[in-house]
Image (cartoon, rainbow, N blue to C red):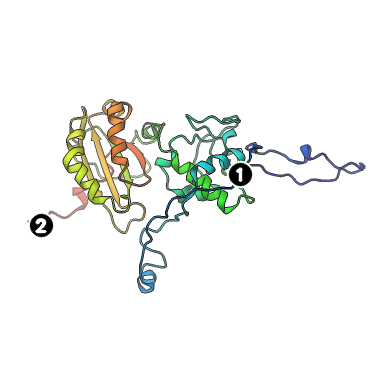
Amino acid sequence: MRAFATVRRVAGTQTLLALAVAVVVLACERGGRTVPTARSVGPPPPPVRMSMEALHAAGGVPFDWKLTPAPGDAVRGRAVYEEYGCASCHVVQGETFAQQGSNPGPELTGMGAHHPPGYFVESIVNPNAIVVEGAGYAGPTGLSTMPSYPDMSLVDLTDVVAYLSSLNSGHNHAMMMAQQNMVPTALRERPAPPPQSGGIHLVMRFDVQPGRLADFEQWFRDEGRAKFLATDGLVGIDTYVTSGMGGPAIVSIFTFRDQQAAARFLDTPEGLALGEHWDSFIGPHGHTLSLLPPVYRADSLSTPPVR
């Protein structure tokens, strides 16, 4: 991950600038390790099949389409990550690299559980498509601090994305995100919510892994529901299925008595094990803590129910 400055001839001199001076490191330091050429990748996910007529009727892309990179080699991707000097900007807890977090950049611990592979692809090839506001994300100009990599091959890109997608544990992103969602925003007016049974909501939006829905439903019915309800401070779980709204189609809302109860659940080995079992059935997702229910019926703007 290195940017190259233009080598200019200095007026009045006959000596070319040394390469060490010509190369200006603007962001991350490139490592000197050798990336293996051999790769080991798994089978691709089952394709979406549809007729041309259905594709055109859907506006040219399948419903809820998102960029899906080909399967990559996460082990080789780790070597690519180190070769391009990513570790000099980004910390990954539990990993040891020659250059570890010497430059400011967002931490990547657990990121694979919170972003789909296509998001990582865009972050690398077009880092200014989405600029997260905050230290380490945006520079003084308001653009992303992430450099671009025009010399990265498609194979290297695929494998480093596979490595990033494999980082699915080790950091409590739900609690990390709580600070920006704990106070209801005053930027927009909204009808008041109905009386709540709990004080805080953990929201997850996801799609179930292909072919896992029946197993997911059976596990929750036979085992998961009782274990969740045995958790001190968990008031209830509500799951909704959306359509035509873009993004993942399933929203689950875990309602806790208060923030302390949510923190206990997310920090205890029992809660983490239960959450990981839930996660084993679903795809990439994020966690958001909110004081307001993410979805509720506004009686003031609704007609009375038909009886």
Name the side, left or right, on which 229 lies relative to 52.
Answer: left
Residue 129 visible in the displayed image: no
Element marked by disc 2: loop
For discs 1 and 2, the disc positioned in front in the rendered view: 1
Please identify the quadrant where the C terminus is shown: bottom left
Query: What amino acid is found at the position of numbered circle 1 in the picture?
Result: Pro
Q: CA distance from mark 1 to mark 2?
A: 57 Å
> Residue 53, how many percent across, how many down?
36, 74
> Residue 200, how many percent across, how many down?
27, 33
Q: Nearer the viewer, residue 126 or 142?
A: 126
Residue 194 visible in the displayed image: yes
Q: Which residue is mark 2?
A: 306
Q: Nearer the viewer, residue 195 or 21?
A: 21
Seen at 47% across and 54% down, the residue is: 70
Seen at 38% across and 63% down, the residue is: 62
Q: Nearer the viewer, residue 77 or 133?
A: 77
Q: Are there few (<14), some (14-19), or many (20+) residues within 10 Å of tag 1?
A: some
Please identify the quadrant where the N terminus is shown: top right
Query: What amino acid is found at the position of numbered circle 2 in the picture?
Result: Val
Name the side, left or right, on which 101 lies relative to 175.
Answer: right
> Residue 178, how many percent across, how many down?
37, 33
Q: Which residue is mark 1?
A: 147
Q: Earlier in the sequence, mark 1 or mark 2?
A: 1
Instruction: Classify 96 as above or below 141.
Output: above
Q: Are there few (<14), some (14-19), or many (20+) residues within 10 Å of tag 2?
A: few
